[in-house]
Image (cartoon, rainbow, N blue to C red):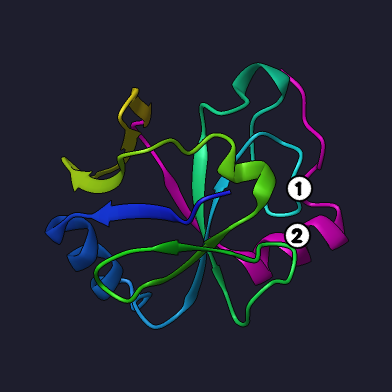
C-alpha cells in the first residue's frame, strides 16, 4: 500500500501539545471491538469509530507510519489502513476530534486513550473484548 498521509490541523496540534502527546508513539485505529486497543463498537460500527492510542513504545502490530507535517509519530495497521482514504485529516473543533478523508467525515468524536491502561483493563477483565452491537 502507498504511504498514508494525514493533515493535522493547528487546533489538533495544540490539543496534542496540551495533552503532552507530540513526542509519544500514537496509533490511529478503527475502534470496532476487534483490536487489542479497541474500547467500543462491534460489527455494526466497523470503520465508523476511531481512536488515537498513546503508547509507551512502538507496537510491532501497527507498523505503518502515517506521514504528517508536524513530525508526530502516528502509526496504524494494514487492517486499520483499509478504512483511511486519501485526503485524511484530523481536526479539533468544539471540543471534538474530527477524522475525515475525501469521502467525508469518518468520525466526529475520535477518542484519545492510553494503550497501557487499555491492555491492563483487558487483562483484569474490566473491559470486555470482542463486543458486539
* Quadrant of the drawing holding the C terminus: top right
**Residue 14 position in % (x across, y down):** 18, 67
The residue under label 1 is 127
Q: CA distance from mark 1 to mark 2?
A: 6 Å
Residue 117, quarter of the rendered image: bottom right
Quadrant of the image occupied by residue 32: top right
Is 127 left or right of 27, judged from the image as shown? right
Residue 110 seen anywhere in this rendered image of the structure: yes
Mark 1 element type: loop
Q: Residues within 10 Å of mark 2 (few under 14, many from 20)?
A: few
- SS at mark 2 in the image: helix
Proximity of marks 1 and 2: CB atoms separated by less than 8 Å:
yes
- Image coordinates of residue 125 in percent, x first then y, are 86, 53
Which residue: 86% across, 61% down? 123
Whole-percent x, y for residue 36 in the image? 76, 53
Q: Residue at x 69, y 72 (%)?
A: 59
Query: Is 125 positioned to the left or the right of 58 in the image?
Result: right
Q: Which residue matches tag 2?
A: 121
Which residue is drawn at the image coordinates 63% and 77% (left, top)? 58
Q: Is residue 81 above or below residue 4?
A: above
As drawn, which residue projects farthest toward the front?
A: 2
Magenta-tinted stretch = 107-133
Q: Residue 130: within the magenta? A: yes
Foreground residue among 42 and 10: 10
Q: Nearer the viewer, residue 60 or 129?
A: 60
- Say few, some or many: other residues with alpha carbon within 10 Å of mark 1 (under 14 / 14 to 19 / 20 or more): some
Q: At which x and y percent is residue 115?
A: 63, 66
Measured along the vertical axis of the image, is residue 129 above or below residue 104? below
Determine whether 130 is above or below 120 in the image: above
Residue 38 visible in the snapshot: no
Residue at 29%, 45% (x, y): give it: 89
Residue 53's label in the rendered image is: none
Amino acid at each position: 500500500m502507498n504511504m498514508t498521509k494525514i493533515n493535522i490541523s493547528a487546533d489538533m496540534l495544540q490539543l496534542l501539545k496540551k495533552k503532552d502527546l507530540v513526542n509519544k508513539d500514537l496509533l490511529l485505529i478503527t475502534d470496532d471491538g476487534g483490536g487489542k486497543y479497541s474500547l467500543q463498537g462491534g460489527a455494526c460500527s466497523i470503520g465508523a469509530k476511531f481512536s488515537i492510542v498513546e503508547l509507551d513504545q512502538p507496537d510491532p502490530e501497527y507498523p505503518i507510519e502515517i506521514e504528517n507535517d508536524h513530525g508526530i509519530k502516528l502509526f496504524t495497521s494494514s487492517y486499520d489502513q483499509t478504512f483511511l482514504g486519501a485526503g485524511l485529516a484530523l481536526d479539533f473543533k468544539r471540543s471534538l476530534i474530527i477524522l475525515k478523508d475525501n469521502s467525508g467525515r469518518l468520525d466526529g468524536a475520535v477518542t484519545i486513550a492510553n494503550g497501557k491502561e487499555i491492555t491492563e483493563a483487558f487483562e483484569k477483565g474490566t473491559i470486555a473484548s470482542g463486543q458486539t452491537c
